[in-house]
Amino acid sequence: MRRLKVPEYILSIKPYVPGKPIEELEREYGISGSIKLASNENPLGPSPKAVKAIEGALSRLNRYPDGSGHDLVMKLSEHLGVSPGNIVLGNGSDEIIGMLTNAFLVPGDEVIIPRPSFLMYEIMARSAGARPVFVPLKSLSIDMESIAENISNKTRLIFLCNPNNPTGSVISGKDFARFIQKVPQNVIVVADEAYIDFVRDENCFKSIDYINSEHHVVTLRTFSKIYGLAGLRIGYGIMPEDISGILNRIRPPFNASIPAQAGAVGALGDEAFFKKTVRLVHDELDYIYASLTDKGIRYFPTQANFFLVDTAKNADDVFESMLKLGVIVRSMTSYGYPEYIRVSVGLHKENIRFIKALEKALL
Ligand SMILES: *Cc1c(COP(=O)(O)O)cnc(C)c1O
């Protein structure tokens, strides 16, 4: 067979490695009853109102979805206090990241990305042939001053993750206000707020405040975490209309499926589930902090539904030991923290089991 011609910049991409699925772990180790605390999913399951709405939509599956996502866009517009023209739906917020990089980048452009942060920014920037410019975190937080200093005349996009995955840190409103003054208005600043609803820090920056400013600020949100709909694939971007107009040129018309649109509308009406999720995460974080402190294990406080633990050992080994005990976490070796693991907040009994497994793994 003849060798395929593949662009160099595509060959430079390392495939995304997702958290290990429970089924795979149990097959490999011949165990059962294991728990997954590796992908920041909602341990309470999906929003019940979303499930009900999805069930109600199933009889319409012979039809194509509403390409404009009318009902969901209207509901979001009301919910967020922005105009419908500011909203673009995606097959997960991942897809919006890809639309932004496809629409605005040509080979040679620069994209500023904090490191470590969510891996999709790098993958999508590279897939458009752009050059990622990495800015290291400072004390586990995004270094806004250093990001501003790295802006060049080739910079087109800046990705911010607030709270940051995997560190759980947030950018303050003050720091962002100072930062945005140094950003040329033709540079798009993307604030990924996948975990914004878990934030307790009142000083946290809210990107939606900038929707009508003279700057190009895009907010990314998702139904995957707080509403427990990661498997449904639905997220959205909130952005000035000169950006949404461009994204709608390349957006696949049926990227949000009928169940996804219906489920998301149902979820937005499920205030009780939203509150229950937030309360669980906050209560459990307080419990976990106290337990880890008690056992002398170092952790980093978080504003998200996951946190880092400093194992003071090889994180890959700790990860493996915990796997054998049926607890799936994430080793941070590939994120540049060879002794840290990232753990998602689970149900109370899962968190108890996590702490026991961690203790054993650290013996
Ligand atoms: C989980 C996560 C998302 C959500 O992606 P979806 O495609 O909407 O499931 C986005 N950004 C970050 C930082 C995440 O951790």
Image: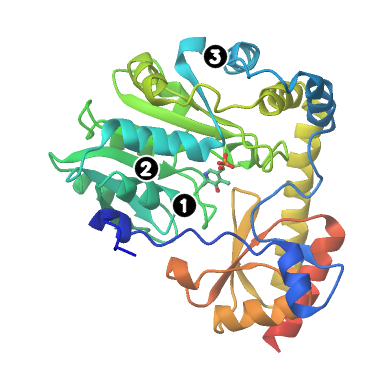
Q: Which residue is mark 2?
A: 159
Q: Quadrant of ligand 1?
A: top right
- Residue 237: where, in percent of width, then height? 48, 27
Going by the numbered disc 1, the residue's amino acid type is Phe
Q: Which residue is mark 3?
A: 68
Q: Quadrant of the N terminus?
A: bottom left
Q: Which mark is residue 25?
A: none
37 or 80, which is in the foreground?
A: 37
Q: Secondary structure at mark 3?
A: loop
The answer to which quarter of the image holds residue 92 is top right
Q: Is residue 109 above or below residue 23?
A: above
Q: Which residue is mark 1?
A: 118
The answer to which quarter of the image holds residue 274 is top right
Q: Is mark 1 within 8 Å of ligand 1?
A: yes
Q: Is residue 166 above or below residue 334?
A: above
Q: Check contact, mark 1 vs mark 3: CB within 8 A.
A: no
Q: Nearer the viewer, mark 1 or mark 3?
A: 3
Q: CA distance from mark 2 to mark 1?
A: 9 Å
Q: Earlier in the sequence, mark 2 or mark 1?
A: 1
- Residue 361: where, in percent of width, then height? 70, 83
Look at 20% across and 30% down and name the residue there: 184
Going by the numbered disc 3, the residue's amino acid type is Ser
